[in-house]
């Protein structure tokens, strides 16, 4: 694969939306994402346009896209969370942190190193923002993702959060 990694730009909104819809339709989506396909399908275009615009600049949220010959084959996000907030699982944020979110690689591109380069680029960005580690939450039953994250150097922090979808494990990787 001739994969390139780049930050989303506002004009990518429709293609990024379509990739997200594909991710939410994946058989593993029920243990991989906190939103559903039905929820995403109900969102107006303005939501997706704003989402792409916010992730295209600044240091609070990032979305990276993986392209192969012009086709999107994967995406990851990094969300900066501030101390004193509650995170998306409802757990308190005790220190400012960078969290890897929205990880997806199209099935045809899996096993070709796309995830590796996406995560490395996300780690590089987080380090540039002054973080010394990147964290993520993964469903305890998502064995495919847990194995991939372990291969990429993420280890358990010991934090576990019970959600409506089941137990989420917090992993971290030093930068």
Image (cartoon, grey):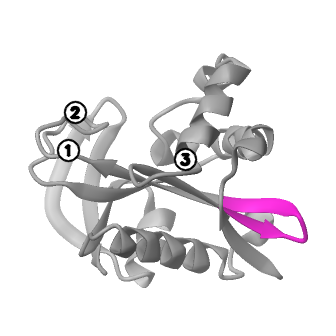
Q: Residues within 10 Å of mark 3 (few under 14, many from 20)?
A: many
Horizontal side of 55 relative to 128 (left or right) equals: right
What residue sits 77% from the left and 40% below the top? 18
Residue assigned mark 1: 161
For the residues bearing labels 1 and 2, Cβ distance under 8 angstroms: yes
Q: Residue at x 17, y 67 (%)?
A: 157
| Front position in the image: 138 or 16 | 16
Residue span colored magenta: 65-74
Q: Secondary structure at mark 2?
A: loop
**Magenta-colored segment: predominant secondary structure:** strand
Front in this rendered view, residue 109 or 56: 56
Q: Closest to the observer: 166 or 122?
A: 122
| Vertical order, 66 against 78 (above or below) | below
Tell me, yes or no, whether the two marked residues, 3 and 2, touch with CB atoms within 8 Å.
Answer: no
Read off the residue under disc 2: 90
Q: Position of residue 134 (x, y in %)?
A: 32, 68
Question: Alpha carbon of mark 3 to alpha carbon of mark 1: how far?
Answer: 26 Å
Q: Nearer the viewer, mark 1 or mark 2?
A: 2
């Amino acid at each position: 694969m001739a994969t390139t990694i780049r930050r989303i730009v506002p004009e990518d909104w429709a293609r990024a939306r379509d990739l997200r819809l594909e991710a939410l339709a994946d058989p593993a989506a029920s243990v991989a994402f906190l939103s559903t396909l039905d929820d995403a399908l109900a969102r107006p275009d303005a939501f997706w346009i704003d989402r792409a615009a916010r992730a295209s600049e600044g240091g609070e949220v990032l979305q990276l896209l993986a392209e192969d010959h012009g086709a999107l084959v994967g995406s990851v996000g990094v969300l900066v969370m501030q101390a004193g907030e509650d995170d998306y699982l409802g757990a308190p944020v005790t220190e400012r942190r960078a969290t890897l979110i929205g990880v997806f690689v199209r099935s045809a591109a899996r096993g070709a190193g796309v995830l590796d380069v996406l995560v490395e680029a996300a780690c590089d960005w987080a380090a540039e923002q002054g973080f010394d580690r990147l964290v993520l939450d993964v469903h305890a039953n998502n064995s495919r993702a847990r194995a991939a994250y372990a291969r990429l150097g993420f280890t358990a922090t010991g934090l576990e959060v019970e959600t409506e979808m089941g137990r989420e494990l917090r992993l971290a990787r030093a930068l």
